[in-house]
Image: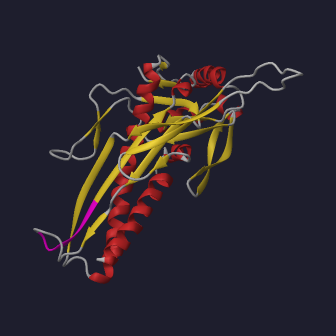
Amino acid sequence: MANSIETAALFQKACDQQIIEGATSGWMEANAGNVKYSGGREIKIPTIATDGLGNYDRNSGYPRGKVALTYQTKTMTQDRGIEFLLDRIDVDESGFIATAAETMRVFQSENVIPEIDAYRYSTLYKLINAKGNVETYTPDKSTIISSLKADIGEVRDKCGSNTDLVIIMSIPIAEKLSYGEEFQRYINLTAFKQGEISTEIMTLNGIPIIRVPSARMKSAYTFNSGASAFGFTAASDAKDINWIICPKSAPIAVSKTDGVKIFDPSQTQGADAWKIEYRKFHDLWVMDKALDAMRASVSA
């Protein structure tokens, strides 16, 4: 049993790392560096508030302000899971780890990562839309640059010129953009780090453009329960998100593989098979003061 526990722990660590490095939204998890997590669905997000300046007095000196450190408790609403059976005849003892690892790699790459991306981007859209900061725009090569620059200007006006921004963009829109002659005057490449991986991506006026498959850039999704369907599907009234512009530090994303369980064939009830049970908690938040500095564009 000890070997199964050790293997499960390795799988759990590898699963979390794959999400961070494989999801197009994996960079958001770096914003959760100070978040406290001790298992389960709850996390604690730290918030610091300070007093403003006062007048210096030559007799009494400095006015003493206050620093308040508080933690907001948040509950991850996405509690997802799956169970897989690997038949004993198909998997001999020496090959189990390799076979199970490949199963989990494919499962996360083809199912978990797209779903987490879709949830995060649709959640950002809902939060931005609730603030009234969504523009309806049908992309055209001749106007994409001007529309983007207008949104960037509005974001800069809220958060300042020295704040690092990101542009999250649907791949079809990015293709329209990159073929425009005007874009060549603004295009550049920059290093972008996500987890332990650093890649070069396109920038617009120095702002990284994160290209996302359009299937993950919808305004709303249905996340199926697994009773009659698995995975996720776009809602019937979903709109195509063209792009989202936000401070890089604004989205706080957490995903935790909580409890990968592995049972050998002698422990599995009802089947002569290895059984893998996988549970994933995840969610995304944006602090209220950061929401004003976010803009989104959707197709008509």
Quadrant location, the C terminus: top left
Task: Point out the stretch of residues depicted in magenta.
Answer: 271-277
The reply, left or right, for residue 106 in relation to residue 196 is left
**Horizontal and vertical percent for residue 248?**
59, 37
Compared with 139, 98 (above or below) is below
Where residue 275 sits, quadrant-wise, is bottom left
Q: Residue furthest right?
A: 58
Q: Residue lying farthest left?
A: 270
Magenta stretch secondary structure, dominant: strand
Q: Does 29 sit above or below residue 55?
A: below
Nearest the eye: 244 or 254: 254
Please name the residue shown 23% across and 62% down the image: 84
**Side of 170 where 60 appears, left or right:** right
User: Would residue 41 be counted in the magenta stretch?
Assistant: no
At 55% from the left and 54% from the top, the residue drawn is 195
- Quadrant position of residue 102: bottom left
- Is residue 128 visible in the rendered structure shown here? yes
Query: Residue 250's image quarter?
Result: top right
Residue at 33% over, 27% down: 238
Residue 218, image x, y percentages: 38, 32
Residue 113 location, x and y as percent?
A: 40, 49
Residue at horizontal 32 percent and vertical 65 percent from the top: 103
In this view, the residue in front, 260 or 26, is: 260
Q: Nearer the viewer, residue 245 or 62?
A: 62
